Image (tube, rainbow, N blue to C red):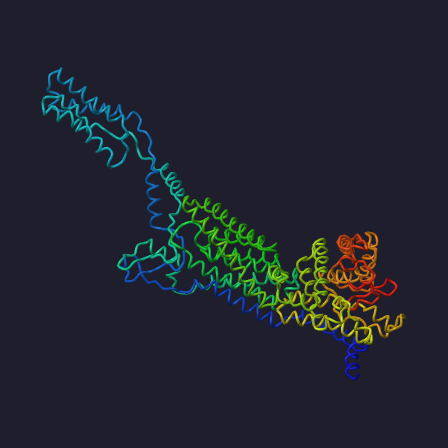
């Protein structure tokens, strides 16, 4: 008896009031402390900033190759990351050739006539030719004029090699063989070749402008070394191309570039400050939750680490989108985990920033930033609606297909060869599959480590074959059946108002686990046995009913039910009044002094899913007492129960709106109308011949109350045993 008094004193009005006051003080204290700077969050920001700065600046550390132009290398030097760089020497030679080809010339007016006039003058002045007979001299002059005219029709530019080349062609012309006298042939060839002159003269002004234009059109010649590829082999002489590669790889830094390091550190600080401001303004529930911030920091650091590893390990000696695929996988999987465990909007923000960082890490190439951003976005969308194995397959197809398409499009823009495009698309598919694998493993690890709940975990819990549900079915079959029906109601209602239907259904399955400890105290498990509550005081009955919530949460924690589900379980009765025992204790007259003793300790539902579970539990339990159900009677019955909870203030802390309540009420009515439909009574003879009684026989009716439910006042009708 003393034990009973000690137990009851916990639920006295004074004790309850004291607990409420203390709870209120703690809440105020939390709100005040949240407004101040939290040392743990400050330390987390500092550590994360330092780690990210180190990861992003590590490639700037002096890695010292002291070779100079013309030196002979004594060892092999490998590229520690994939890099593209300008071959300055090859670019210079290409531009010089372009400038040479850009020389401009102007025509020499009447160059052919001048050459012929010069020929005639020299012909007459030549002793051998002038002493010839008239017919022979005329024939020789005609031959010489023909050779000069033919040569002057060709381009002879004012260049050192072109005029001598034209004169040599005249000296060896086959037409000279028609002259029989060797001395005459020599004289004709000499005067004809000497008469030639350039017909195009170099134009310096036009050449200068054309040379500038031609050099400007020559693009830098870019070379590429993949990570692990030999830049310089032992015994090889150093040329300018090697020096350019060393500079691009940072292998010739004599010291750390302090300005670059400072710039990167400032950039990291600004990005972290931006994320912190975003969380404080738009996601305060994450901003004030240190474990969630730790998870966000871990995932971000791991993604950046993946970017660094990807920039050094997967730069295989092939072109296309091979470089950075490990980076893309890490960012994509990190974004998917953040979307599942924290918020999709936060995941979009983080992967956008990481995609920009990937371009900085992976040689400032837009290709990697676009690949990472597109793949991460596709991954977040793909994992947003995971509900079953079919959804996993759909997510795989979305992610792999998006990666392949991105690689194909970007490879086309980059001018990749067809085989390179195919290779890039194949690696996109592989990276998408591996990213989904990382997401699945990462989610399974982090949700347990940080006490979070994903849709995949809820799917596992919704399986009736789980050991704890099997134990519930064997120990308390009536409660098990009730839980399944509550799950059906809660799932339909949550889905109708846009709440988490899977969470509502899973919480409904497990909400009465505590009844396994004392199944005989709950009427759905009593069958035709005597009601034990008829022999004990109403206050003790209330204590038993109250205990099943706490004990259910303890069982759920012991078997590994996630905190989110346990939270909904704990709130499924709120601070509801156990009306039957309250009226039994007060003799039917309200007694405010005793009311607190017959209320559940709470807390009231805070989530939509918890409020829906409360209403579904109440409606399903009370519906068993409804006689001769018709659609209208069921609608009135549900409306009365829902209004009762609302008027009692049980929904004040939840996010349900009046419109939500109307929708929930409509769904409950529709579902119960389908399950509580009237049945055709069997003829008495048929019933007797089978030795059974009709399901509607008065022998199954009882006026006993249904303890364990949020009971209505006696005026609302008598109870029926299920």
For image coordinates 16% across by 26% down, the residue present is 189
- Position in image of residue 212 (x %, y %): 39, 42
- Position in image of residue 80 (x %, y %): 39, 60
Looking at the image, residue 655 sits to the left or right of residue 455; the answer is: right
Looking at the image, residue 71 sits to the left or right of residue 495; the answer is: left
In the figure, 670 relative to 125: above or below?
below
Whether residue 333 is visible: yes
**Residue in front for this viewpoint, 606 or 264:** 606
> Quick one: which residue is furthest to the top in this view?
135
**Residue in front for this viewpoint, 453 or 71:** 453
Looking at the image, residue 294 sits to the left or right of residue 408; the answer is: right
- Position in image of residue 11 (x %, y %): 79, 76
Corner quadrant of residue 104: top left
> Quick one: which residue is furthest to the bottom in this view?
2
- Quadrant location of the C terminus? bottom right
In the figure, 32 relative to 125: above or below?
below
- Quadrant location of the N terminus? bottom right
Corner quadrant of residue 527: bottom right
Whether residue 651 is visible: no
- Position in image of residue 558 (x %, y %): 63, 72
**Residue in front for this viewpoint, 696 or 301:** 696
């Amino acid at each position: 008896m003393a034990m009973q008094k000690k137990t009851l004193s916990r639920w006295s009005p004074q004790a309850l009031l004291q607990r409420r006051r203390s709870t209120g003080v703690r809440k105020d204290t939390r709100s005040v402390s949240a407004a101040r700077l939290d040392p743990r969050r400050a330390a987390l920001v500092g550590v994360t900033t330092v780690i990210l700065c180190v990861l992003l600046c590590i490639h700037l550390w002096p890695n010292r190759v002291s070779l100079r132009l013309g030196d002979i290398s004594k060892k092999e030097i490998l590229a520690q990351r994939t890099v593209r760089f300008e071959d300055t020497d090859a670019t210079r030679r290409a531009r010089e050739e372009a400038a040479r080809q850009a020389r401009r010339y102007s025509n020499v007016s009447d160059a052919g006539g001048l050459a012929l006039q010069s020929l005639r003058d020299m012909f007459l002045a030549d002793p051998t030719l002038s002493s010839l007979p008239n017919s022979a001299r005329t024939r020789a002059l005609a031959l010489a004029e023909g050779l000069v005219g033919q040569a002057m029709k060709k381009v002879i530019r004012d260049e050192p090699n072109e005029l001598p080349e034209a004169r040599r062609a005249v000296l060896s012309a086959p037409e000279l063989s028609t002259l029989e006298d060797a001395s005459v042939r020599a004289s004709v060839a000499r005067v004809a070749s000497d008469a030639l002159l350039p017909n195009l003269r170099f134009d310096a002004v036009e050449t200068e402008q054309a040379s500038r234009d031609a050099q400007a059109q020559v693009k830098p010649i870019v070379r590429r070394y993949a990570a692990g590829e030999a830049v310089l082999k032992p015994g090889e002489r150093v040329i300018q191309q090697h020096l350019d590669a060393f500079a691009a790889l940072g292998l010739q830094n004599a010291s750390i570039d302090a300005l670059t390091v400072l710039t990167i550190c400032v950039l990291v600080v600004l990005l972290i400050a931006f994320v912190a401001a975003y969380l404080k303004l738009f996601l305060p529930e994450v901003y004030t939750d240190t474990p969630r911030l730790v998870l966000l920091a871990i995932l971000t650091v791991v993604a950046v680490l993946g970017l660094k590893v990807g920039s050094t390990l997967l730069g295989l000696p092939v072109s296309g989108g091979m470089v950075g695929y490990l980076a893309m996988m890490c960012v994509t999987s990190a974004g998917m985990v953040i979307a599942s465990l924290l918020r999709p909007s936060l995941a979009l923000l983080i992967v956008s920033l990481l995609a920009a960082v990937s371009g900085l890490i992976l040689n400032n190439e837009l290709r990697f930033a676009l690949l990472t951003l597109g793949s991460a976005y596709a991954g977040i969308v793909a994992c947003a609606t995971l509900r079953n194995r079919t959804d996993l397959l759909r997510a795989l197809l979305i992610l792999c297909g998006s990666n392949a398409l991105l690689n194909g499009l970007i490879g086309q823009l980059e001018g990749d060869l067809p085989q390179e495009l195919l290779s890039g698309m194949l690696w996109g598919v592989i990276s998408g599959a591996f990213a989904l694998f990382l997401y699945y493993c990462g989610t399974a690890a982090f949700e347990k480590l940080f006490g979070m709940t994903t849709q995949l975990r809820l799917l596992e819990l919704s399986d009736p074959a789980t050991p704890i549900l099997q134990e519930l079915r064997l120990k308390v079959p009536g409660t098990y059946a009730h839980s399944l029906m509550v799950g059906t109601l809660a799932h339909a209602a949550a889905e109708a108002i846009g709440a988490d239907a899977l969470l509502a259904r899973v919480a409904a399955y497990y909400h009465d686990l505590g009844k396994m400890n004392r199944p005989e105290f709950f009427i759905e498990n009593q069958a035709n046995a005597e009601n034990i509550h008829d022999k004990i005081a109403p206050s003790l009955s209330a204590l038993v009913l109250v205990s099943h919530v706490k004990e259910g949460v303890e069982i759920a924690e012991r078997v590994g039910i996630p905190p989110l589900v346990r939270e909904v379980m704990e709130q499924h009765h709120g601070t509801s009044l156990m009306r039957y025992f309250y009226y039994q204790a007060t003799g039917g007259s309200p007694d405010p002094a005793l009311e607190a003793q017959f209320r559940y300790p709470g807390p009231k539902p805070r989530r939509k899913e918890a409020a829906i579970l409360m209403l579904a539990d109440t409606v399903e339990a009370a519906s068993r007492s409804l006689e001769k159900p018709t659609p209208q009677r069921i609608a009135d019955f549900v409306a009365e129960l829902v209004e009762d909870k609302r008027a009692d203030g049980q929904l004040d802390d939840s996010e349900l709106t009046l419109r939500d309540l109307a929708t929930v009420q409509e769904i409950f009515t529709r579902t119960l109308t389908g399950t509580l439909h009237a049945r055709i009574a069997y003829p008495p003879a048929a019933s007797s011949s089978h030795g059974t009684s009709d399901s509607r026989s008065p022998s199954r009716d009882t006026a006993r109350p249904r303890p364990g439910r949020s009971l209505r006042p006696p005026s609302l009708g008598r109870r029926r045993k299920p």
